[in-house]
Amino acid sequence: MKDTVSTMIKGMAMGTAEVIPGVSGGTIAFITGIYEKLLHTIKSFGPGLFPVFKESGFKGVWSAVNGAFLIRLVGGMLIGVVFGVFAISYLLETYPPAVWAFFFGLIIASAIYIGRQITRWGPREMLLMILGAMVAYGITVVAPAKGSESLIFVFLSGSIAISAFILPGISGSFILLIMGMYSFIITETLKPALKTLAPDKLLIMFVFALGCLTGLMTFSRLLSWTFKHYRNLTMATLTGFMLGSLNKIWPWRNAIEWLRDKRGAIILDKDGITPKKILIEQNVMPANYDGGDALVVAVVVLMIVGFLSVFVLERLGSNKED
């Protein structure tokens, strides 16, 4: 029972993180001690299950894919996604600096945590950490694309975004944002699908999920291989990814570009006043923040809370899994 609750809590944290652009569920998996186990579980899905099924039936397949662990984790993630879509979305709209501060502190502590797992820091590790940071930073400043509602592009966005999901430091939601698909998938499709079970929205989510499954099957094998053969180098790269991603979650950011129509006019939300989606933001200091109350005290407090929460998650990760 204790293991079940522990795994579901980790899954809830991962699911919630993935809804927030700039925060990676892979980061949560790593600091809770289930990252490599998750990679191994995902990698176990494939053609190799057919001979297992022939020899041992469903029981053998369930054991081969670590079904008990997976079902608990996925169950927790689904709860976390629903919580993130509604509760976290509201908090981001109402108190954005405070929410981003919490995750800024969490990512800093996570980068330190991952860096501590490297047994030897040499020139190659330092170089890959710097390169990882440069790549992640570069991704955070790329101007988002306009996206597409084509099912093929929905499939492709799912494949790419889910790869980021299992990569600490790069958020799957942020990849969707860069591809111009975040608003379409999260706001225009997932929310209505959860509320009304509309067939057209469910079809889009099915295609997106299929893309996610394809990306998971492919990228998990690559990452598992690098962990096995180049563990320190992989960890150094992931540390760099996390440090470079901090640019995206700085608490105070001013919008400088919004989604526009073909005529160049800013596309407004249903209220006719609020821009539908921000495309580009600029990091600023509290005195220059034009998004309302800078919430400086709350930012400092929540940044510290986010930093310390990593140690709580690390303690949670010390629990043994079945």
Image: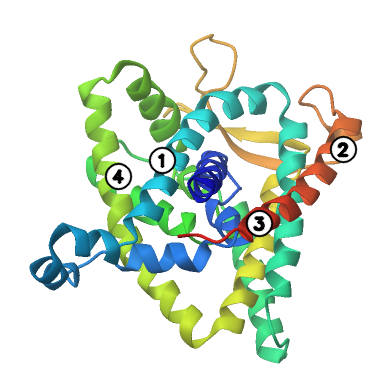
Residue 27 in the image: above or below residue 48: above
Q: Is residue 246 left or right of residue 204?
A: right
Amino acid tagged 3: Ser
Distance from Cα at disc 2 to Cα at disc 4: 37 Å
Label 4 CA crowd tier, 10 Å (few <14, some 14–19, many 20+): some
Q: Secondary structure under badge 4?
A: helix
Residue under numbered circle 2 = 301
Distance from Cα at disc 3 to Cα at disc 4: 25 Å
Q: Is residue 159 left or right of residue 277?
A: left
Q: Secondary structure under badge 1?
A: helix
Residue 218 coordinates in the image, percent (x, y): 32, 67
Q: Which is more N-terminal, label 4 or label 3?
A: 4
Residue drawn 58% across the image and 27% down it: 89
Residue situated in front as seen by the camera: 217 or 172: 217
Residue found farthest to the bottom: 123
Colour mode of the rendering: rainbow
Residue drawn 26% across the image and 34% down it: 204
Would you say the residues marked 2 and 3 are in contact, meaning their CB atoms lie under 8 Å apart?
no
Amino acid tagged 1: Gly
Q: Which is more N-terminal, label 4 or label 2?
A: 4
Q: Secondary structure under badge 3?
A: helix
Would you say the residues marked 1 and 4 are in contact, meaning their CB atoms lie under 8 Å apart?
no
Q: Which mark is residue 245?
A: 3
Amino acid tagged 4: Ala
Can residue 181 be seen at all in this image of the molecule? no
Q: Which mark is residue 75?
A: 1
Q: Which is more N-terminal, label 3 or label 2?
A: 3
